[in-house]
Image (cartoon, rainbow, N blue to C red):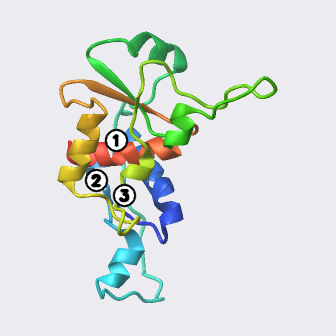
Amino acid sequence: IVLYHEDIGLLNRTARVFVTLDHLGLGEQTFVLSGGLPAWLEGGHETNDVLADFSPGAIEVSELKEIFITATELDQLRWSDKRVLIDARSDEEYYGTPGNNEDPVVGGHIEGAYSLSYLKITSDDSPYLFRSDNELVELFRNAEMDPGKVTLIYCNSGIKGSLNYLAARHLG
């Protein structure tokens, strides 16, 4: 299974499809085209408008991979030294917006969570491309991620966190 996005606005959703397929046990059979359609076209590769002749496939869903947890489970697990909690939202959402007497603070993060914004996962030069593996490792390391720990990633809806999940999964 090869997934790709047509523009930067769809990259997070493509990552969410990957997360869903990984949950269904199909992650090892699924690949995401680095840079999506924009990188494909920039690389001089062709496209066409001919509808391929497909026959039904035989994909079988294996045992579900446990990659989702409940809020109660998160609350119990977040303080373990064997786990790290990552907030994938933007810096503004993580830190919140200061309030006043009329309007309270808006935003903020779950206590104990480190920030690794989904916006930092892609390249500054080409936002539809992931950063290099070395840059991603450094970002994850700065957010206290450790291959020896279970990483819990959250955001508002699962879309932003999916990009972090995809990048982390790529790195192993």
How far apart are labels 1 and 2 at the CA level? 9 Å
Q: Secondary structure at mark 1?
A: loop
- Which residue is more in the foreground, 58 or 130? 130
Q: Tell me where residue 81 appears, x and y as whole percent.
A: 27, 13
Q: Amino acid at mark 2?
A: Gln
Task: Count residues near mark 1 (Cα–Cα under 10 Å), then give few for <14, some for 14-19, many for 20+.
Answer: some
Label at residue 29: 2
- Which residue lies under the disc numbered 3? 122
Q: Is residue 32 left or right of residue 103?
A: left
Q: Is residue 72 left or right of residue 97?
A: left
Q: Amino acid at mark 3?
A: Thr
Q: Earlier in the sequence, mark 2 or mark 3?
A: 2
Q: Quadrant of the N terminus?
A: bottom left
Q: Amino acid at mark 1?
A: Gly
Q: Tell me where residue 35 appears, x and y as whole percent.
A: 35, 68
Q: Residue at x 27, y 29 (%)?
A: 144
How far apart are labels 2 and 3 at the CA level? 23 Å
- Which residue lies under the disc numbered 1? 25
